[in-house]
Image (tube, rainbow, N blue to C red):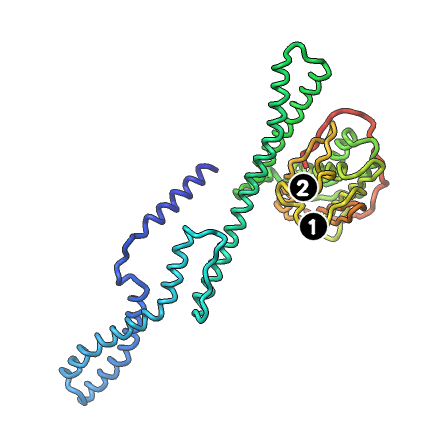
């Protein structure tokens, strides 16, 4: 990706250097416009004069004399008129030339009475600046958030490492275990964060984030997530997985879809209090596979719902930063990555949520075979209660 960036920059610089500082006057738009206007004005005059000369109404030498006066006069008049015509373009050029040194918060001034063409150009430039400013703000915020997320675990690792070095062999066994566990957890968090950042960077660069697509049965993905959740889910929660009786075939990357479903299920578990319920249901509707992750947790406020899929965006701390032995603090990238993966599969993710009632994330994917006799019959629900205490972390939310 660095090689591509260097090539693009070199091509851009070459394009800029290819434009000479001083362009000959006859290559200007004013000169070309003057030439076109003069030729278009002289052609009918020449045609009339040829007809007059052919009819012997005017001697040929007199016609030549009149042309010696007429051609310079027409050229001068058209040069002046062309200057008036291109004046708005000159003013627009002066304004756009200042863009390189302009504050992005400023915009090109809209001049009253300006021709509609240059007015539309100014508006287009202003829209372009709006997008540039928005992209720059997003990039700055992304760098700031990423730096913060990297600094937090590194600070924790550094602190416990210094503690171990300072205490040496005199450190308490319990404290040693806590320090090593924290270092391990934070290292894992760093690895997940870097992996998430790499996925998003690939998507931003236009590179495929789906490794290999094949015909898969979504029920198998749900069962795989079910096996993982059976081990890691808190025993205080009631978790149901609902699968249809017939295959739900999609053309997809099974590992990526498992990552998305683990992320959504993990978020639902973290948002649900003891005694609550999390339901993962798969079914088909027309030509789509519909996967719902439903929780009875604290819900998400309407203002947060609008930005829930933004990078590094988190709702209140009580929902997203719950930390247990099995669920470390999230990076705020999981839902952004999930959205990117589902879009790459031609699907969508939707959110419905009410405060203190719960949330529902709905994933829709196109079915691979529309002629397959799909069934929406639902198999009996299976309640999965945590039976073991093995430590296993799903993909980070």
Task: Answer with the quarter of the image where residue 208 lies.
Answer: top right
How would you rate the neighbour count of disc 2 (Cα within 10 Å): few for under 14, some for 14-19, many for 20 or more?
Answer: some
For residue 108, above or below residue 240 = below
Whole-Å distance between the Cαs marked 2 and 1? 12 Å
Please name the residue that numbered disc 1 is placed on.
Answer: 303
Tell me the quadrant of the picture where the C terminus can be found. Answer: top right
Residue 156 visible in the picture: yes
Q: Nearer the viewer, residue 86 or 261?
A: 86
**On the picture, is 69 further left or further right than 205?**
left
| Element on which disc 1 rests | helix
Asked whether, in this view, residue 121 is left or right of residue 38, the answer is right
Residue drawn at the location 25% of the way across and 76% of the way down: 74
Which residue does the image show at 71% across and 29% down from the upper left?
Answer: 393
Instruction: Give the image location of residue 361, x and y in percent.
Output: 73, 46
Position of residue 120 measured from the top left corner of the image (x, y, whole percent):
47, 65
Task: Determine which of the numbered discs, if any, sits on residue 314 in the image.
Answer: 2
Q: Position of residue 153 (x, y in %)?
A: 62, 28
The quarter of the picture where residue 72 lies is: bottom left
What percent of the width, then of the height, locates residue 375? Answer: 79, 48
Residue that extends furthest to the left in the rendered view of this protein = 61
Tag on residue 190?
Answer: none
Q: Residue at x 76, y 46 (%)?
A: 360
**Rendered residue at 29%/53% (across/down):** 21
Camera sees residue 369: no
Q: Going by the image, does 387 lie left or right of 216?
A: right
């Amino acid at each position: 990706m660095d090689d591509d960036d260097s090539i693009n920059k070199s091509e851009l610089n070459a394009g800029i250097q290819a434009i000479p500082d001083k362009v000959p006057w006859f290559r200007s738009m004013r000169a070309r416009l003057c030439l076109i206007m003069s030729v278009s004005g002289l052609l009918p005059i020449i045609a009339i004069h040829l007809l007059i000369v052919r009819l012997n109404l005017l001697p040929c030498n007199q016609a030549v004399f009149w042309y010696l006066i007429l051609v310079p006069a027409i050229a001068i008049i058209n040069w002046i008129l062309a200057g008036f015509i291109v004046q708005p373009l000159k003013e627009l050029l002066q304004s756009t030339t200042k863009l390189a040194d302009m504050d992005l918060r400023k915009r090109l001034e809209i001049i009253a009475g300006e021709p509609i063409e240059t007015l539309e150009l100014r508006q287009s430039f202003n829209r372009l600046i709006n997008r540039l400013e928005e992209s720059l703000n997003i990039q700055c915020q992304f760098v700031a958030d990423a730096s913060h997320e990297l600094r937090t675990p590194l600070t924790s690792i550094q602190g416990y490492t210094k503690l171990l070095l300072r205490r040496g062999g005199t450190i308490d066994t319990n404290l040693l275990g806590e320090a090593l566990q924290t270092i391990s957890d934070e290292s894992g968090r760093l690895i997940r964060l870097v992996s998430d950042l790499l996925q998003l960077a690939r998507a931003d660069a236009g590179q495929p984030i789906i490794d290999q697509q094949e015909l898969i049965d979504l029920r198998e993905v749900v069962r795989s997530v079910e096996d993982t959740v059976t081990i890691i889910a808190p025993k205080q929660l009631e978790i149901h997985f609902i699968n249809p009786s017939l295959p739900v075939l999609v053309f997809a990357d099974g590992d990526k879809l498992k990552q998305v479903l683990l992320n959504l299920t993990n978020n639902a578990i973290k948002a649900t209090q003891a005694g609550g319920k999390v339901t993962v249901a798969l079914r088909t509707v027309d030509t789509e596979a519909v996967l719902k992750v439903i929780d009875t947790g604290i819900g998400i406020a309407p203002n947060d719902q609008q930005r829930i899929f933004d990078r590094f965006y988190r709702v209140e701390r009580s929902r997203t930063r719950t930390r247990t032995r099995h669920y470390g603090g999230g990076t705020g990238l999981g839902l952004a990555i999930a959205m990117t993966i589902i879009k790459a599969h031609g699907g969508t993710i939707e959110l419905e949520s009410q405060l203190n009632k719960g949330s529902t994330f709905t994933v829709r994917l196109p079915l691979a075979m529309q002629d397959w006799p799909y069934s929406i019959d639902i198999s009996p629900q299976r309640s999965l209660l945590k039976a073991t205490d093995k430590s296993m972390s799903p993909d980070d939310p």
